[in-house]
């Protein structure tokens, strides 16, 4: 059995780790109102996206990988001698990528395709990917890795602060009524991934307080874990992200703390100024990424 690991372009994983574990990536894309289309990770970075989002009136749209491209990637892996591929993808609740990858797997012969819905996105998805790659390297079968991922998913999650809900409302990830109420009250929304969907958890007066809310919420969730990896992710809120990272690093030396920025697709939905804190019950030391490495 020769097992490949595949994921999508929203993981924020650095190239050095993709290369180290020979991880295959299928890309999502972004289209602006004027028709400009960019492949994530290849033709558009997050800073350029934020610049355009601030200057353009219409929110860009995002697209899942074309099913034909996923099929081609499976076939490439099969022709390279792989018998199995474990594909880990962003939440089915916010993108059709997982469904496309699953359907593509049913259309390819000669390789066993195992797809996993992370129910999350960004670097928290990256945590799953690296864990899977390390377990494959340790000699586990594809079924054994999948079983461990399903168990891990029960102890993995993320809380998010956004400046407002406009982007999530426009992209259909949250209702207009929810966005209107938060806007009317001039509150900072605190959100949580629940079964793959982004749902309101709380609303507070200031961003500083909102970030404290997600920090305490995550710390409460992991307090009984034997192992902890945390993921600090920001969208054009580097100062907030670095401050949270440094605080966690100083106060929780036994935790693996990872810092990263949202990729363009996720940034499109969450908007400028977003900060997330993800968590899992695995000690994924490989992911001890710092702001200086970004």
Image (cartoon, rainbow, N blue to C red):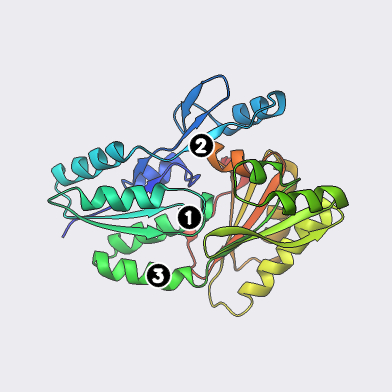
Residue reaching furthest to the front: 177
Query: Nearer the observer, disc 3 or disc 1?
Result: 1
In the rendered view, does 230 fall on the left or right side of 95? right
Task: Return the disc, 3 or 2, that comes first in the chain's sequence.
Answer: 2
Q: Quadrant of residue 128?
A: bottom left
Q: Secondary structure at mark 1?
A: loop
Residue reaching furthest to the bottom: 224
Q: Quadrant of the N terminus?
A: bottom left
The residue wearing badge 2 is 62
**Is residue 210 placed above or below 16 in the rendered structure?**
below
Res. 5 in view: no
The residue wearing badge 1 is 91
Q: Secondary structure at mark 2?
A: strand
Q: Quadrant of the C terminus?
A: top right
Packing grade of label 1 (10 A; few <14, some 14-19, many >=20) is many
**Is residue 73 placed above or below 232 in the rendered structure?**
above
Task: Return the disc, 3 or 1, that comes first in the chain's sequence.
Answer: 1
Picture disc at residue 150: 3
Task: Return the disc, 2 or 1, that comes first in the chain's sequence.
Answer: 2
């Amino acid at each position: 059995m020769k097992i490949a690991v595949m994921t999508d372009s929203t993981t924020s994983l650095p190239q050095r780790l993709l290369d180290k574990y020979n991880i295959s990536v299928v890309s999502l894309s972004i289209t602006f109102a004027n028709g400009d289309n960019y492949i994530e990770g290849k033709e558009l970075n997050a800073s350029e996206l934020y610049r355009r989002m601030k200057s353009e009136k219409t929110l860009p749209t995002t697209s899942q990988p074309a099913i034909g491209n996923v099929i081609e990637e499976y076939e490439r892996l099969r022709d390279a001698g792989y018998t199995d591929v474990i594909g880990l993808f962003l939440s089915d609740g916010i993108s059709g990528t997982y469904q496309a990858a699953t359907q593509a797997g049913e259309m390819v012969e000669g390789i066993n395709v195992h797809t996993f819905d992370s129910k999350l996105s960004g670097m928290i998805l990256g945590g799953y990917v690296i864990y899977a790659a390390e377990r494959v390297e340790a000699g586990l079968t594809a079924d054994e890795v999948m079983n461990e991922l399903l168990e891990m998913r029960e102890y993995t999650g993320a809380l998010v602060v956004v400046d407002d809900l406009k982007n999530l409302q426009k992209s259909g990830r949250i209702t207009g009524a929810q966005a209107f109420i938060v806007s009317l009250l001039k509150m900072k929304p605190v959100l949580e991934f629940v079964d793959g969907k982004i749902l309101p958890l709380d609303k507070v007066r200031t961003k500083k307080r909102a970030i404290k809310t997600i920090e305490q919420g995550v710390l409460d969730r992991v307090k009984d874990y034997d192992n902890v990896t945390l993921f600090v992710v920001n969208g054009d809120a580097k100062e907030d992200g670095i401050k949270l990272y440094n605080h966690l690093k100083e106060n929780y030396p036994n935790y693996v703390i990872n810092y990263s920025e949202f990729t363009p697709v996720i940034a499109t939905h969450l908007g400028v100024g977003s900060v997330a804190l993800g968590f899992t019950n695995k000690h994924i030391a490989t992911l001890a990424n710092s702001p200086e490495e970004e």
